[in-house]
Amino acid sequence: MDNALTLSHDQAEAFDSISEMLRSAGVDLEDSLLTPPRDGKSSVAAVIGKAGSGKTLLLAELVKELEAAGVDIVSGDYEGKRRKDRRTLAILAPTNKAASVLRMRGVPATTIHRIIYTPVYDPEYERIAEWLQGNGERPEIEGLTIEALDRAMAFYQTHKSIPGALASAGLRGSDFITGWKRRDEPLDIGLVDEASMLDEKQFEDLKEIFPTLLLFGDPAQLAPVNQSGSMVFERLPAPAKFELQRIHRQDADNPILDLAHALADPALEFHDFETLIEETARKDERVVWGQRVEVDLMARSPVLVWRNATRIRLINAFRSVHGAPEDMLLEGEPLICDGLELPSKHRKKRLDLEARGLIKGAQVIYLGPGRKPGFSRLHVIGAEDPQVSAASIVKIEIPDEEEPFIPFAARMGATFLHGSAVTIHKAQGSQWENVQVFAPDLYVAAKMGRVEAGQPLWKRLAYVAITRAQERLIWVVRNRLSRPTGPLRVDDLRVAPAPLKLEEETT
């Protein structure tokens, strides 16, 4: 491979070092050769760099070369019978939204949860999965026509997703997945994006599964809340860390990244930074000096804040301007999954919900009530099979009130907070086309003088918030909200190809 054609100098150096690491693990990228994996030996390394340094480009290049060498990509959807000569690769992200960002760039990523826990298929539908993967004859399944199977094959050849292929034949997950089990056999190589979000437990789980583990992370982001300001890759020895310094040429003319990198100047004060934003906004429409929060954007792209009180106030303002009644949700309201309230005896149901994307931090759009009391129909942003119906507990927090208002609730199930505004911590791993940052909150953080991992907290918050924006950054400087230009909508969301059948499973 001629790295000079596609990779910058520091990317090419990292690629060569990683290639050597993979060669000792039995994967020769240069000659596209696979040899038996090493017994008992493991290696962990990290590619670290700030936004725009080319981490994702390097990850995508590695995936392409590993596939060309004959390594099989495991998606977390379905795994056929393990072959002794098979070498496996999984590309992982901590959340569905982060995985979907990679998939939009052509990298077949899945969530960490979907690799740690694997689906158990109904034996009849397992025959279809094996056929789709080229490991058997076309099966005859009662109730499925030849045309339906042909649709499944056409879908699989394009998208490489077993559940998606079966859905195109008119089936849903509840038809062919009978349960979930913790992975009992290791894989070979794991590539983990957004590794700054990993906590110690996830890191240990991944090391058990992958003898060769490569983390991609941004050291300037915010560390997981429970880890005292440190990230798991920071403790790796120096030879195992490959640092990307240069901003890649595709990102060289990006005013949003310029602002993010300006925060590295230790002499930069908050008022200097705001002056820089205002000057940039005059020259480039990709940066906006906002006098108010744009309410129309909040339904799909939450306002990013630091303080919880600000988040709650903005949520209630959003609901108020849309005329949302206190005792119910409107179709199209955004929600954030806050975890699952299920007793331990319902472990199967917990795994089923998590596998469908209802993990803590998942972004969801409310589509309306389910067929049974306490159920909600939901669209999980970034999930490959996004439409779910599940028992729900929705909490609407009220300013100056200790207890949230609960418009409706099942006895147990997935819990949700409103999602029109979120904290910058919870926004990590996500990206949106347009991002609004509530600047008065960061000014408060700057005035407090708080420091995290040796850097002023406001700079870390600003860096993470700014780098969530893919196309346009709106720096909101006033505590005001615009009026909506129209009602909330759900017609922009992809419609499920078959009726929802999850209510019976997820009570």
Image (spheres, grey):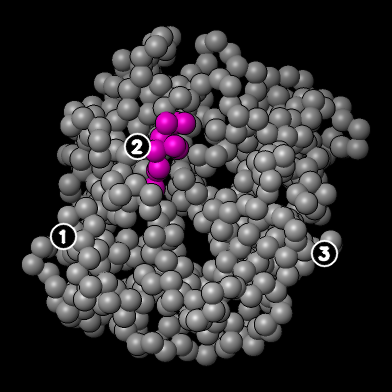
Residue at the farthest front position: 402
**In this view, 438 is above or below 196:** below
The amino acid type found where label 1 is placed reads Ala
Whether residue 202 is in magenta: the answer is yes
Q: Residue at x 40, y 43 (%)?
A: 198
**Residue 422: horizontal and vertical position, in percent?**
46, 68
Q: Residue at x 78, y 51 (%)?
A: 507
**In this view, 181 is above or below 147:** above
Q: Which mark is residue 220?
A: none
C-alpha distance separating marks 3 and 2: 43 Å
Q: What stretch of residues is rendered in magenta?
A: 197-206
**Residue 484: horizontal and vertical position, in percent?**
55, 87
Q: Residue at x 36, y 19 (%)?
A: 42
Q: Which mark is residue 215?
A: 2
Q: Earlier in the sequence, mark 3 or mark 2?
A: 2
Which residue is the site of mark 3? 373
Report the mark closest to the observer, 3 or 1.
3
**Residue 372: horizontal and vertical position, in percent?**
84, 61
Q: Earlier in the sequence, mark 3 or mark 1?
A: 1
The reply to whether dot 1 and dot 2 touch (C-beta < 8 Å) is no
Dot 3 crowding, Cα within 10 Å, few <14, some 14–19, many 20+: few
Tag 1, which secondary structure?
loop
Tag 3, which secondary structure?
loop
Q: Quadrant of residue 491?
A: bottom right
**Residue 409: horizontal and vertical position, in percent?**
73, 65
Which residue is the site of mark 1? 264
Residue 377 can be seen, yes or no: no
The amino acid type found where label 2 is placed reads Leu
Whether residue 354 is in magenta: the answer is no
Q: Earlier in the sequence, mark 1 or mark 2?
A: 2
Tag 2, which secondary structure?
strand
Q: Quadrant of residue 212?
A: top left
